[in-house]
Image (cartoon, grey):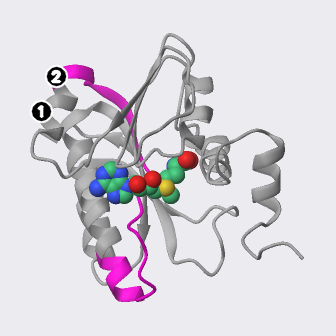
């Protein structure tokens, strides 16, 4: 008998040579909302092991750029228009380095998740902190009109955070892709058309 987590998407990812089943969540959102375009400069926060980077680098193509950041090293060999960076997004020098080395971006993605403890409220609180930081990063490095997609485990701060996102983006949606496990509290906030830092 297969492990319960080794579901349809797990097997499909193996067969299609993706590094993780997570790719199907992004693919579904992409098919429906056309978040990524050829030539885009994309920042991927929490990018390891790299399945979102595999899909994103194919969509943006060699005229685009994908910068993947994670606490963990990313060892998969990627084409030249992909940069991987082992870094904690909470590091004090992160924003400054990111801006000067690679900014601005057309799209900021975050699939970041905390190490889960099993205590739902604690896990949600940590996820909300990651989301809040991803939003802060996006507001610094996105060009006006750019897009933001980020995962969050819904907890007490969710509605306040959503309201904050709505301040900065013209079109905001909450999405739960089919590839996201039903029993998990994770959802994605899709925020399109950034108003810009003065917006
Ligand atoms: C669900 S995985 C991402 C999977 C990825 N989207 C893919 O398709 O391969 C979440 C990642 O967030 C990363 N992460 C969590 N906290 C982070 C932090 N403070 N800075 C950078 N990355 C972080 C974890 O190390 C983990 O690799």
Q: Where is residue 41, by image quadrant?
A: top left
Q: Which mark is residue 86?
A: none
In this rendering, position of residue 41 left or right of residue 14: left
Q: Nearer the viewer, residue 10 or 100?
A: 10
Circle 1: is it few (<14), some (14-19), or many (20+) Cα within 10 Å? Answer: few
Q: Image quadrant for the C terminus? A: top left
Residue at x 49%, y 14% (from the top left corner): 80
Task: Kindly identify which residue carries mark 1.
Answer: 96
In the rendered image of this protein, does residue 181 appear above or below residue 97?
A: below
- Name the residue nearer the viewer: 50 or 102: 50
The location of residue 34, given as percent across then percent down, is 58, 37
Q: Is residue 97 visible?
A: yes
Residue 26, percent across and down?
59, 47
From the viewer's perspective, is 167 left or right of 145?
A: left
* Magenta stretch, residue numbers: 100-125
Q: Can you see residue 111?
A: no
Q: CA distance from mark 2 to mark 1?
A: 6 Å
């Amino acid at each position: 008998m297969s492990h319960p987590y080794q579901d349809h998407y797990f097997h499909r990812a193996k067969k299609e040579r993706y590094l993780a089943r997570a790719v199907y969540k992004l693919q579904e959102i992409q098919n429906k909302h056309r978040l990524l375009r050829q030539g885009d400069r994309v920042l991927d926060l929490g990018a390891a092991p790299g399945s979102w980077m595999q899909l994103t680098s194919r969509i943006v193509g060699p005229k685009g750029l994908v910068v993947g950041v994670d606490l963990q090293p990313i060892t998969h060999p990627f084409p030249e228009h992909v940069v991987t960076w082992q870094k904690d997004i909470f590091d004090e020098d992160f924003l400054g380095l990111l801006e000067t080395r690679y900014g601005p971006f057309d799209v900021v993605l975050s699939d970041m998740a905390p190490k889960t403890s099993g205590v739902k409220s604690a896990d949600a609180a940590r996820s909300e902190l990651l989301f809040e930081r991803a939003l802060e990063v996006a507001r610094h490095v996105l060009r006006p009109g750019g897009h933001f997609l980020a995962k969050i485990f819904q907890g007490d701060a969710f509605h306040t955070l959503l309201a904050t996102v709505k301040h900065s983006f013209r079109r905001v949606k909450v999405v739960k892709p089919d590839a996201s496990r039903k029993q998990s509290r994770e959802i994605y906030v899709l925020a399109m058309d950034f108003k810009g830092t003065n917006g």
